[in-house]
Image (cartoon, rainbow, N blue to C red):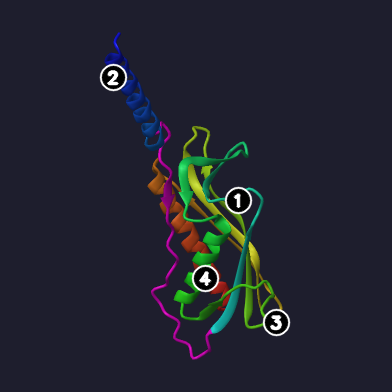
Amino acid sequence: MNNVTKLLVAGLVVALLTTVACSGLTRSDKPATRTWWLEPYTSTAKHLSSDPVVAVEISVSVVPGLDTDRILTLSNEAELNQFTAARWADNLPELVASLTGRALQASGRYDVLPSHGGGGRNGCDLHLEVREFFASIGSTGQATGVRVAVAGHYQCHSDEPVPIHLNASIPVHADHMSAIIAAFQQGMDRVMVELLALLER
């Protein structure tokens, strides 16, 4: 093998290695992660009362296991897992805080203030703890429903705090991710409807 042939072979080897390395950065056997979106609940009936707009601070926490942007599942055997390659647009506390704040603002009754963790010194304080936010998985491994549950309290100035216990259970009838996300949307909307009704009392 002469020098020219050796150079050609070496060049081909380098080109082949470069191609393989680059393709490894852009191709994978794993499915691409899809990000799913939830809309805030917006009532078609706007608040028309002459009462002043209420300033409210919102804080949201979650029980252990739910502080993630992954879309979670819970089996009949109490195994907490997640859907492969699927996530929310943010971690659950931030997601629920945003959805709640925008739902309250959309009602026309509330002005949402940045939360400083100091209670309702400048208005009212709404604290929510998310206790369930997952898809229930049956014995066949398929999603059978979605469960959303929140607890907490609402307090204005020196008034007695109003306890909050809200939940929604939405069945899932189709085995694809869009149907599961639609059930999460329904569950979150139902909880927001009940929350707004509770705060108006």
> Foreground mark, 2 or 1?
2
> Foreground mark, 3 or 2?
2
Residue numbers of the magenta segment: 28-53
Q: Position of residue 90 (x, y in %)?
A: 51, 56
**Front residue (pair 41, 116):** 116
* Residue that badge 2 annotates: 8
The amino acid beneath tag 4 is Gly
State which tag comes first along the sequence, 2 or 4: 2
**Front residue (pair 34, 126):** 34
* Residue at 37% from the left image edge and 34% from the top image edge: 22
> Foreground mark, 1 or 3?
1
Distance of mark 2 from mark 1, alpha carbons? Answer: 57 Å
State which tag comes first along the sequence, 4 or 1: 1
Circles 3 and 2, Cβ within 8 Å, touching? The answer is no
The amino acid beneath tag 3 is Asp
On whether residue 30 falls in the magenta region, the answer is yes
Circles 4 and 3, Cβ within 8 Å, touching? The answer is no
Identify the element where label 3 is drawn.
Answer: loop
Check the image and report above or below for 180 versus 102.
above
Q: For the residue carrying disc 1, how many other residues have a C-alpha within 10 Å: few (<14), some (14-19), or many (20+)?
A: many
* Residue at 48% from the left image edge and 87% from the top image edge: 49
* Residue that badge 1 annotates: 66
